[in-house]
Structures are given as structure tokens and as C-alpha cells.
Image: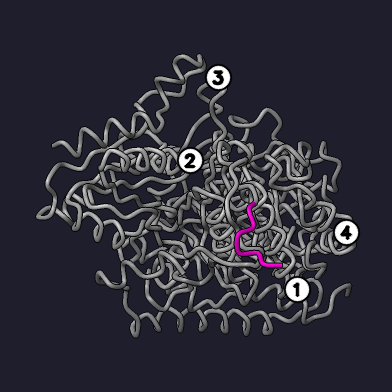
């Protein structure tokens, strides 16, 4: 049977990456809240406990600091832990093992040991969940030397990036947005990697460049496709890796188009969009025909009221009007 | 005699080696040769030595800001330790860590770092790894009484107990968390009693009596190897030097923390002296002890002299090495 165009959901793609890596590597295990439940982490961990047992699929007490540290420590001691945080907000209790320990470990011991841990954080927002059940904190982790940060936008890169994250000898923060979990896409059955640090050219265009990641890549794609009908040709790049981001892919595109919009699902100030904008502004200053523009969340906590949520989050319509404005400059 | 002479002399040698090593840093700290913060272990040697004497090389330990003793007791190289304290490229962390970041993977010293309580969960992870691999090894988390104020300690003790993990929590209770006495920071000064409530083996011992520590550690190691862990040991001890650097933190001096009489009474219970007295009573000749002292002195001296052939890592290329593997 050809698997070339087999379609599965994003959640199933993650599930498949975990299963295949656990089958091929005895040192891989999963630890976090809800992993023994078929639904708690959006079906990503379905059937795992049946196949691998409670020893390698470790559901935990609500002790994020210790449990994240356990994943880091086990990885120092020769295992490859995948530590899942079903809500990224709760993961803040685990910042010490991630930032003080794992991120610094290889450097502060002069390369004497590394930490091949995956910290898997799920952004779980919307539905009037409010400030502490919504946060997208990729910028926080991308700020830290020694951490890699990836954010898949579709089922294909979810599987490939998770495999790459597990195989990476460094700590990788794998962040996904639960709004993607039911999206389907083509995913090869076999084990494969999406290289960390490489962006994907989604669509070629000459009028300007747009860079997006995670859930907003889909919104950007909708926007770009609609604008194509109006004759506006936007080159769209899926960032895939937040850190280290693919400087070559973005600068190559901006040198061609002369304009850039950076789209990010985190806050605007001091965020991912700020970093990319700053870097491109100096790298491509001579080729830029307009300032670099950014679309990101306003600098306020996530609200509960769904009417306020509509103001807070943005979608393809906002992206369309922003691109129109930039192209006309 | 209850113990083989070799066992006793090995223990003595480690105690002396740590003490000599620690005291060798005093002048270089005072004259600025050593720049970074150094937390001396003088006075607490019996805890590291007693625990590590009960471990195999394949067992692992994690330490703290005050871990020179754990490093040496577990079998780490004195030369690499001394080099690291002076931030030389020949150090165990290639001059990137300094006194507070020590590692010797081949000796089972998996890492010491200075965030209070920060390595306890890492040791627990190593215990989980041992349990997944079924390799019967044991992990030890060394930490101070200050760490008993961190929630993560009790998260770890709980999880270790729930999963019956092969970890020994070793609380070195030296009665002071930096400048705060234990009675100012804990409602119950007996840390082991809190651990007991998690339904595990938990015992308070004299941390200045190396054989007490050794015996309790052996018992704890056996329990852990038989899947009857985790265990908690509270070793009461005292630092002869201050929190950081050689200053002894006596009241009336600028750090003004500890009553002089308290320090004097603990000096009488210096763990190296106590064990020397025990050995002499047990019939070991003074010559044997002098020979060990001499050897330890030479080892430390050689380590310090070897600094002449080393340098501090420097330059931009060196700076950016090791961020990622």
C-alpha cells in the first residue's frame, strides 16, 4: 500500500512519532500529566500505555517542577525523556530545570554532558479560558541560550519535528497549539525527520514575504491564497523552528521581495516577531523597500470574554488587510 | 575490629584529602587568585565520605554549591577539581563552571549546581533512569537544610515514594541557610520528620561521625537496591568556614551570624579529628595516618602546582563553545 498521500490528523501524527521512536529506541519515555488517558492530551497519547506500559508512559502528580526535573535528570543519566505539559501555563513551575539546569548544562560543564530532553508544551487557549489557560510563551524559551524551540504548523512537521527533537542531543522545547490537533495532512507512515533550524517555503511570490508559524501559518496560507486571486503574490514561509530560526531562508526571500511581515502567536513586545524583524532590518537593510511589519498579540493578558478574545486573537482577515496595506506602501 | 583496615584507611584518606583541598583554597581566595564564589566543605566531610563509601562507582550523585567534598568522595580527580576552582581549561568543566559547577561523569558525579534544591529532581530522574534500565544502581541527591524550604524537595520525595525509586535524599543540615538559622526558617527543625510523612525510611544521624553516616548509607543503599527505596538521611553537621569563602561568620565580625561558642563546640567535634581518635583507639598506628596525611598533602600540592601549566579559557571562539552539543 502506498503511503504517499495518506492523511492523518496532527494529533495522530504526534502519536505516531512517539510510538515509532519508542519502538526503535528503548531509552525514550514519556512523562507528564494525562499521558495514560486517551483524551487528556488531545489523543496524542492514545494507546501508548497499552503498548509500552506504565513504566515508560508515566502519568504524574501535579508537581511540574519536580516532574520536569525528573525528565531532565533522566536525560542527563542516559535516557531520552519527552516531558509533556498539557497546558503551557502550568509549565512555568518547571522553569528551573528547563532554564537553569537543562539549557546551561552542556555549557557550564564545558561539554562534559548534554541533556537530550524534549519539553513538549501545549498551548491550550480560547473558549473563554482566560489568562492562565491561554499563554503562548515561545519567546520566553527562545530567549535562553542552550534551548532549541520548534513549533510545527501541520501534521507533517508535527511528526517530523518531534522525531528530530527526540533525536537531538540538546534540550528542545516542542510547542504546539491545540487548535491544530484535528487538522489533517499528508504524513508518511515511515519514521522521518524535519530538520531543526530549517524553514519551509510554502508558496513563492514576488510582492512581499510573510513568515508565520504554528496555527497562524494556516491563517496566513488562507490569506495568501485569497490575495493571490486579487493578483497579490506573497511569498509565504513556515518558520517551523523558532530558535535557531532559518536566517538564510528568510533573508533570501526578503532580498527578492523587499518587504516582510512577521506573524507570531505570542505577544508583540520583545517577542519572536521583534527578533526576526530586528535581524532582517539590519541584514537586508539595503534591499528593504519598507519597514518590517509585525502581527502578534497585543500586550495584554488573554481575556476570558469571547468578545474580548475576538479582539485579542487575529486570523486570516487581519492578515489580509495588513498585507494589502504593506503591498500598497 | 568491625571494619577491614583498608575500608577505614580509605575513608580517612578521603576525609583528609577533602580537608586539605578545601584549606588550600583559603589564601588564594583571600589574595584574589581565586575570583569566583567558593563554598568550603570543611567540617562537613564525613557526610560526603560516609555516603560515597557505601556507593559503587556505577551509582551516581548530584550536588550543590558546596560540592567539592562530594566530587572528591565520589572519586573525582583532585587535579580537575582544583583546576576548575581556578577556572582553568584543564578543569572538570573546562573553566566554564568554576567551584559551583562540578562534574565527573566517569566517577558517577553527574553534576553539582548552585540553585538551592535544583539538582534534587535531577537525581530523582537518574533514579528513574536506573529503575527503567533495571540496572540496580542508586542515585544520591545531596542538598542542604536550606533546600528543605523549596517545594520541589517535597514534590520529589513524594514521587520517589509513590514510584519506589532508588534514590537517597541526603540533607546536610549545617543549621544555617546562608545567614538564617534553622529555627528562623523551619517550623520543625528536624527535617527527617517531614520526610517520614511520605512513608519512607528516614533517619537523623550525626553527620560528623563518618561511621554513623557510612552505616546508615549502607542500609539505605541496600534498601534502594532491593527496590525498597527511597530513603532520606538528615545528617546534622556544621561548617567550620562560613557560607561562602573562608570567613567563619562569627557574631561581631562583619558577617555577624553565628555565636562564637557554637563554633568552638563544633570544632571539638571536627569530623576528621573524631575519626582520627577512633582509628587510634581501634589500634591503627599513628604512622599509618601520617603517611596518609602526607600523601594527601602531596596530591593537593601537585594539583595546585599543575596550575602553572594551565590557562583560563579566553577569546571569542572559546566563549561560544559548548552552547549546544
Mark 4 highlights which residue? B227
Are discs 2 and 4 less than 8 Å apart at CB?
no
User: How far, Cα to Cα, is label 2 from label 1?
Assistant: 50 Å
Question: Vertical placement of A28 versus A312: above or below?
Answer: below
User: How far, Cα to Cα, is label 3 from label 2?
Assistant: 18 Å
Mark 3 highlights which residue? A128
Mark 2 highlights which residue? A215
Q: Where is residue B156 in the image (x, y as percent from the top left)?
A: 71, 45
Establish whether labels 4 and 1 are both on one chain.
yes
Residue A2 covered by magenta stretch: yes
**Magenta-colored span:** A1-7
Which corner quadrant holds the N terminus of chain B? bottom right
Establish whether labels 2 and 1 are both on one chain.
no
User: How far, Cα to Cα, is label 1 from label 3?
Assistant: 55 Å
Give whichever of A84, B249 is nearer the camera: A84
Tag 1 or tag 4, which sits nearer the N-term?
Answer: 1
Amino acid at each position: 500500500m502506498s503511503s504517499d498521500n495518506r492523511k492523518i490528523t496532527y494529533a495522530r501524527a504526534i502519536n505516531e512519532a512517539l510510538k515509532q521512536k519508542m519502538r526503535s529506541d528503548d531509552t525514550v519515555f514519556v512523562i507528564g500529566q494525562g499521558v495514560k488517558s486517551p483524551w487528556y492530551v488531545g489523543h496524542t497519547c492514545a494507546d501508548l500505555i497499552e503498548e509500552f506500559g506504565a513504566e515508560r508512559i508515566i502519568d504524574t502528580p501535579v508537581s511540574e517542577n519536580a516532574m520536569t526535573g525528573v525528565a531532565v535528570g533522566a536525560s542527563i543519566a542516559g535516557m531520552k525523556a519527552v516531558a509533556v505539559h498539557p497546558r503551557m501555563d502550568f509549565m512555568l513551575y518547571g522553569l528551573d530545570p528547563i532554564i537553569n539546569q537543562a539549557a546551561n548544562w552542556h555549557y557550564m560543564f564545558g561539554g562534559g554532558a548534554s541533556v537530550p530532553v524534549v519539553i513538549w508544551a501545549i498551548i491550550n487557549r480560547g473558549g473563554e479560558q482566560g489568562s492562565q489557560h491561554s499563554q503562548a510563551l515561545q519567546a520566553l524559551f527562545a530567549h535562553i541560550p542552550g534551548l532549541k524551540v520548534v513549533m510545527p504548523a501541520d501534521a507533517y512537521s508535527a511528526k517530523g519535528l518531534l522525531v528530530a527533537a527526540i533525536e537531538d542531543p540538546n534540550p528542545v522545547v516542542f510547542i504546539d497549539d491545540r487548535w491544530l490537533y484535528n487538522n489533517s495532512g499528508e504524513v508518511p507512515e515511515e519514521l522521518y525527520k524535519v530538520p531543526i533550524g530549517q524553514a519551509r517555503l510554502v508558496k513563492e511570490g514576488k510582492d512581499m514575504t510573510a513568515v508565520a508559524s504554528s496555527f497562524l501559518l494556516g491563517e496566513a496560507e488562507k490569506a495568501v491564497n485569497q490575495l493571490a486571486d486579487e493578483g497579490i503574490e506573497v511569498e509565504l514561509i513556515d518558520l517551523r523552528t523558532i530558535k535557531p530560526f532559518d536566517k538564510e531562508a528568510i533573508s533570501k526571500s526578503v532580498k527578492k521581495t523587499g518587504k516582510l511581515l512577521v506573524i507570531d502567536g505570542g505577544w508583540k513586545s520583545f517577542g519572536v516577531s521583534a527578533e526576526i524583524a530586528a535581524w532582517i532590518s539590519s541584514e537586508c537593510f539595503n534591499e528593504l523597500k519598507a519597514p518590517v511589519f509585525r502581527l502578534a498579540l497585543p500586550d495584554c493578558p488573554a481575556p476570558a470574554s469571547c468578545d474580548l478574545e475576538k479582539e485579542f486573537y487575529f486570523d486570516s482577515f487581519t492578515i489580509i488587510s495588513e498585507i494589502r496595506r504593506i503591498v500598497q506602501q | 575490629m568491625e571494619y577491614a583496615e583498608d575500608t577505614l584507611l580509605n575513608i580517612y584518606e578521603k576525609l583528609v584529602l577533602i580537608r586539605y583541598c578545601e584549606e588550600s583554597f583559603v589564601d588564594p581566595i583571600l589574595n584574589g587568585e581565586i575570583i569566583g564564589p567558593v563554598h568550603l566543605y570543611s567540617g562537613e566531610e564525613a557526610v560526603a565520605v560516609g555516603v560515597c563509601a557505601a556507593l559503587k562507582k556505577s551509582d551516581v550523585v548530584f550536588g550543590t554549591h558546596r560540592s567539592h567534598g562530594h566530587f572528591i568522595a565520589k572519586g573525582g580527580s583532585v587535579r580537575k577539581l582544583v583546576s576548575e576552582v581556578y577556572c582553568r581549561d584543564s578543569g572538570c568543566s573546562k573553566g566554564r563552571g568554576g567551584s559551583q559547577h562540578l562534574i565527573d561523569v566517569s566517577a558517577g558525579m553527574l553534576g553539582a549546581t548552585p540553585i538551592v534544591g535544583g539538582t534534587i529532581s535531577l537525581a530523582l530522574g537518574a533514579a528513574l533512569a536506573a529503575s527503567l534500565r533495571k540496572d540496580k544502581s542508586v542515585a544520591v541527591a545531596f542538598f542542604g537544610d536550606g533546600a528543605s524550604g523549596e517545594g520541589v524537595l517535597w514534590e520529589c520525595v513524594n514521587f520517589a515514594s509513590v514510584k519506589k525509586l532508588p534514590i537517597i535524599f541526603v540533607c546536610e543540615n549545617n543549621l544555617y541557610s546562608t545567614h538564617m538559622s534553622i529555627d528562623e526558617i523551619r517550623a520543625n527543625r528536624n527535617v527527617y520528620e517531614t520526610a517520614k510523612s511520605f512513608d519512607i525510611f528516614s533517619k537523623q544521624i550525626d553527620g560528623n561521625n563518618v561511621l554513623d553516616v557510612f552505616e546508615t548509607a549502607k542500609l539505605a543503599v541496600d534498601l534502594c537496591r532491593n527496590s525498597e527505596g527511597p530513603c532520606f538521611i538528615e545528617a546534622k553537621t556544621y561548617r567550620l568556614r562560613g557560607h561562602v569563602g573562608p570567613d567563619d561568620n562569627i557574631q561581631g565580625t562583619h558577617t555577624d551570624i553565628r555565636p562564637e561558642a557554637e563554633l568552638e563546640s563544633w570544632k571539638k567535634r571536627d569530623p576528621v579529628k573524631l575519626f582520627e581518635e577512633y582509628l587510634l583507639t581501634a589500634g591503627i598506628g599513628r604512622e599509618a595516618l601520617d603517611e596518609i596525611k602526607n600523601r594527601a598533602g602531596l596530591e593537593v600540592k601537585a594539583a595546585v602546582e599543575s596550575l602553572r601549566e594551565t590557562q583560563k579559557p579566553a577569546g571569542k571562539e572559546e566563549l561560544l563553545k559548548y552552547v549546544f552539543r
